[in-house]
Image (spheres, rainbow, N blue to C red):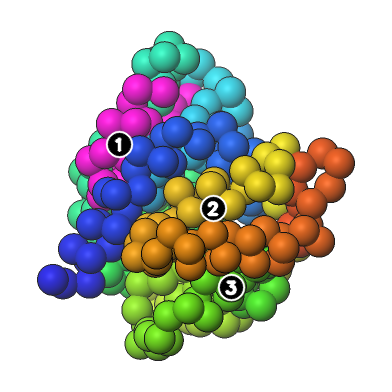
């Protein structure tokens, strides 16, 4: 199975859970959405493209911002994710949100179509990121901006490691190739920025966003949320015996306790926001 097929298979299995937890996930990553809006300079009446939109975020969050005379398009390679996004848009009666199945390096849009392009935690999973960046530049209007969010170093993000380290202790380590599609593929500062330069993005920049991942989900319920969000974690815990699973769950919940508050869970988090501009025609 090719790497892109593996990624598609993984996220296809996660689609029902991401739709189930749509509102919670929107809350978790709201500060990242705000940073993308700021760096892509999204405003009213804009035509905006959201790459790897999943079940519709952050595309759906942008609809009030662009207003009735603007439009938000969300694309994802996973048909089940796109179907979930469409269901939400229909339920909310959002006429200016449209969702399509598409790969980031083969976008079904004409050149110079968008006032802004964003992607929240998507570029890490693109089979050919530099081809995707060049395709983004094709559909972006000259002088307009693209902005993407990728996770910073895993050790700076307990939302991930607090549970995964506990679970991983019960399995043989399987090191990933340095450029394998993975959440932390571009966690090293400067790595994605260099691809921006290579793709021809004008004035590329990178900034570190430090924020809190907050959710009203209570401590013991967070175990289920996190497992359902991650195909890798689900696969591992499903392979454990009931006795081993009970012990792993106990250990994981104990590791999460320091992030539990009276209002739910709160994790310090760090993300890299990489942005730039499409050159104006000369």
Where disc 2 sits, the SS reads: helix
Question: Looking at the image, which is closer to me, 277 or 64?
Answer: 64
Badge 3: few (under 14), some or many (20 or more) residues near its Cα, within 10 Å?
Answer: some
Tell me where residue 65 sits by quadrant: top right
What's the mark number on residue 226? 2
Q: Is residue 85 above or below residue 270?
A: above
Tell me where residue 28 sits by quadrant: top right
The residue that disc 1 covers is 82
First-in-chain label (3 vs 1)? 1
The residue that disc 3 covers is 166
Question: Looking at the image, which is closer to me, 279 or 243?
Answer: 243
Residue 188: image x %, image y %? 57, 82
Q: Farthest residue to the right: give it.
A: 262
Residue 164: image x %, image y %? 55, 69
Of tags 3 and 2, the one toward the viewer is 3
Question: Looking at the image, which is closer to me, 135 or 92?
Answer: 92
Report the quarter where the C terminus lies: bottom left
Q: CA distance from mark 2 to mark 1?
A: 21 Å
Question: Who's the residue at 23% across and 41% down the image?
Answer: 79
Q: Is residue 169 visible?
A: yes
Where disc 1 sits, the SS reads: helix
């Amino acid at each position: 199975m090719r790497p892109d097929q593996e990624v598609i298979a993984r996220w296809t299995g996660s689609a029902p859970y991401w739709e189930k937890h749509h509102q919670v996930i929107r809350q978790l990553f709201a500060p990242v959405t705000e940073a993308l809006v700021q760096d892509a300079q999204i405003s009213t009446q804009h035509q905006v493209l959201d790459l790897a939109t999943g079940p519709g975020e952050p595309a759906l969050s942008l609809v009030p911002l662009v207003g009735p005379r603007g439009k938000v398009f969300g694309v994802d390679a996973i048909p089940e994710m796109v179907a979930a996004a469409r269901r939400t848009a229909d339920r909310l009666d959002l006429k200016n949100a449209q969702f399509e199945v598409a790969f980031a390096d083969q976008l079904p849009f004409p050149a110079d179509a968008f006032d802004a392009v964003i992607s929240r935690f998507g570029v890490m999973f693109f089979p050919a990121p530099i081809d995707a960046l060049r395709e983004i530049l094709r559909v972006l209007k000259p002088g307009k901006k693209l902005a993407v969010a990728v996770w910073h170093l895993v050790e700076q993000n307990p939302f991930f490691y607090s549970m995964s380290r506990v679970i991983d202790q019960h399995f043989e380590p399987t090191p990933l190739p340095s450029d394998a599609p993975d959440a932390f593929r571009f966690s090293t500062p400067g790595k994605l920025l260099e691809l921006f330069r290579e793709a021809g993005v004008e004035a590329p920049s990178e900034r570190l966003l430090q924020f809190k991942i907050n959710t009203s989900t209570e401590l013991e319920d967070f175990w289920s949320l996190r497992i359902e969000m991650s195909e890798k974690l689900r696969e591992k815990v499903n392979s454990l015996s009931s006795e081993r699973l009970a012990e792993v769950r106990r250990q994981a919940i104990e590791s999460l306790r320091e992030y539990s508050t009276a209002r739910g869970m709160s994790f310090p988090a760090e993300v890299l926001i990489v942005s730039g501009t499409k050159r104006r025609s000369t």
